[in-house]
Image (cartoon, rainbow, N blue to C red):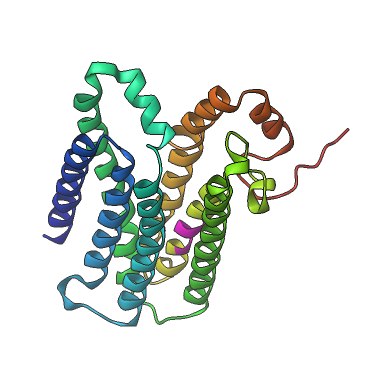
Amino acid sequence: MIVPAVTAGVSLAMMLAWAVQRRTGNAGWVDVIWTFALGGAGVAYALAGGMGGTRAWLAAALVAAWALRLGGYILRRTRHGAEDVRYASLRAEWGDGFQRRMFGFLQLQAAVAAVLALAVLLAARNPAPLGLGDAAGVAVFLTAILGGNAADEQLLRFRRAAANRGQVCAVGLWRLSRHPNYFFEVLGWCAWPLLAISAAYPPGWLTLAAPALMYWLLVHVSGIPPLEAAMLRSRGDAYRAYQARTRPFLPLPKWSLK
């Protein structure tokens, strides 16, 4: 019963997100609620049924840390900034049908969150003793948390400086990647297969779907494509030059073969 209950809870949370964005006129609140809803779903899955165990508590702690870090950052950004350009673009594109289409869009986001949360459930239920895979998973997770926080804070400081208004952020990690925050987000979801996969637990392999899904969404669907389109409209040639010299995803120097 835990899976239907958690899935319904995430769906209700995104109904709330729809109501909040409608009342405030700022769809950035959607991302805040989605992040905390996914974190809550993960914690519920990890600790459901009192099955406990060290790995279950570890999984709960990791997904809670992820939600608090990312959700807290998006909350700060939403409270003190304009609407996310991705949602502003949808508002302009959908026109009078925005609210109707937004409701369906947020239920799709609820479905994504429900699928991602299953990775936490599978990791928490892995019966194998803690070992090197778990240590590697925690190391990957911490790297992702620290890297994502560094990228977000660098962008936030850049945007708050009046001298940078209208400019393209190309400092710190943003000098190496146009979307380092997305890279570290995908990296963080790679931790769950490391916690879940073991010889004694074939279902653990299903957690590979979580980082694959997150990569597909951020790189090909709802992350990079609409954000880059908006940046090209607002920054023009400056952003095209940034694209030419900077990788879209991996935070590595872009070497030329010429």
* Image-based side of 190 in relation to 95, left or right: right
Residue that appears at 54% across and 26% down? 234
Q: Main secondary structure of the magenta part?
A: helix
Quadrant where the N terminus is found in the figure: bottom left
Query: Which one is nearer the viewer's eye here, 11 or 52?
Result: 11
Q: Is residue 153 visible?
A: yes
Task: Determine the image quadrant of residue 67.
Answer: bottom left
**Residue range (magenta):** 187-191
* Residue 103 position (above or below residue 255): above
Q: Nearer the viewer, residue 162 or 77?
A: 162
Instruction: Give the residue at the far right of this rendering.
Output: 258
- Looking at the rendered structure, the number of numbered marks drawn on it comes to 0
Residue 212 or residue 28, whichever sits in front: 28
User: Residue 77 appears at what percent x and percent y?
Assistant: 41, 49
Side of 9 where 149 appears, left or right: right
Name the quadrant of the C terminus.
top right
In this rendering, is residue 200 above or below 247? below
Front residue of 83/122: it is 83
Residue, x 39% and y 48% (percent of image)? 80
**Where does the image place residue 224, in percent across and percent down from the top left?**
51, 35
Position in image of residue 41 (x %, y %) = 24, 59
Residue 199: where, in percent of width, then height? Answer: 43, 70
Quadrant in the picture for residue 256: top right
User: Does the magenta run of residues contain 183?
Assistant: no
